[in-house]
Amino acid sequence: MGKRTSGPSQSVRLWGVISCLVAVAGCSSFESRSSAPFIPVVIESLQDVHGQWEGTVKELQSRNRGWVTVSITNRESFATYTFAGTAKGNPFLGTGRLQLQSGRLLTEGEGRTLTFTLAEREGVRMLVVDGIGKDGKSHHAELSRAE
C-alpha cells in the first residue's frame, strides 16, 4: 500500500497556515487594545460643543478616508455648523442647522442627516459624527478640538 510521508512541502504548508492564523489573531487583538471605546457624554448645552473641531472622516461603504474641519456656532436656541474637508483628493463642504435633542445634536435637511455625539476616549473629549450624506452614503467622523 502507499505509505504517506510528511515531506517538506506538507511541513511548509502547515507552517504557512499556522503563521497566517497567528498573524490574524495578533492583528485582531492589537486593534482591540489600541482603540479604547468611546464613552458617550451628554451634551447639556450648545456651549459644550461650540468652536472648531477637526479629524478623520470615512465613508463606511468604501472605507475611503479623509480629513474634515467642523465649526459649530451657538445661536442660543440652536447651533449652526460649517464643514470643509477632502477625501481622495476631492474637496467637500457644507453648512446646516443643529438642534439639541436627548443630549446629542441632530440635523436633517440640506440633503443630509447627521448625529453629533460628544464622547470621551482615554480622558480626551471627542465629537463623533455619524450620518448619511447628499450622496446617500454613510459617513463616520471622529473629531477633536482644533488647536
Image (tube, rainbow, N blue to C red):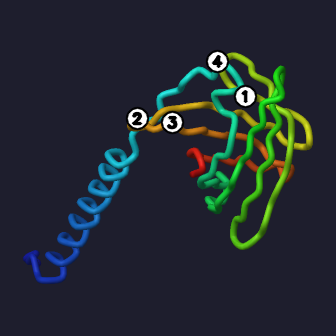
- Report the residue at 28% width, 65% height from top: 20
The Cα atoms of the two marked residues, 3 and 1, are separated by: 15 Å
Which label belongs to residue 44?
Answer: 4
Which label belongs to residue 4?
Answer: none
Question: In the rendered view, would you say 87 is above or below 51?
Answer: below
Q: In which quarter of the image is residue 111?
A: top right
Q: Quadrant of residue 21?
A: bottom left
Q: Quadrant of the N terminus?
A: bottom left
The Cα atoms of the two marked residues, 2 and 3, are separated by: 7 Å
**What element does badge 3 sit on?**
strand
Query: Which residue does the numbered mark 1 point to in the structure image?
Result: 105
Residue 9: horizontal and vertical position, in percent?
Answer: 18, 82
Residue 124: horizontal and vertical position, in percent?
Answer: 45, 38
Pointer 2 local density, CA inside 10 Å: few below 14, some 14–19, many at least 20: few
- Report the residue at 73% width, 60% height from top: 85
Q: Which of marks 4 and 3 is nearer the N terminus?
A: 4
Query: Which residue does the numbered mark 3 point to in the structure image?
Result: 125
Which one is nearer the viewer's eye here, 28 or 3?
Answer: 28
Hey, what amino acid is under mark 2?
A: Gly
Q: Earlier in the sequence, mark 1 or mark 2?
A: 1
**What element does badge 4 sit on?**
loop
Hey, what amino acid is under mark 4?
A: Glu
Pointer 1 local density, CA inside 10 Å: few below 14, some 14–19, many at least 20: many
Question: In the rendered view, would you say 25 is above or below 51?
Answer: below
Hey, what amino acid is under mark 3?
A: Arg
The Cα atoms of the two marked residues, 4 and 2, are separated by: 19 Å
Q: Which of marks 1 and 2 is in front?
A: 2
The Cα atoms of the two marked residues, 1 and 2, are separated by: 21 Å
Q: Nearer the viewer, mark 4 or mark 1?
A: 4
Query: Which residue does the numbered mark 2 point to in the structure image?
Result: 123
**What element does badge 1 sit on?**
strand
Hey, what amino acid is under mark 1?
A: Leu
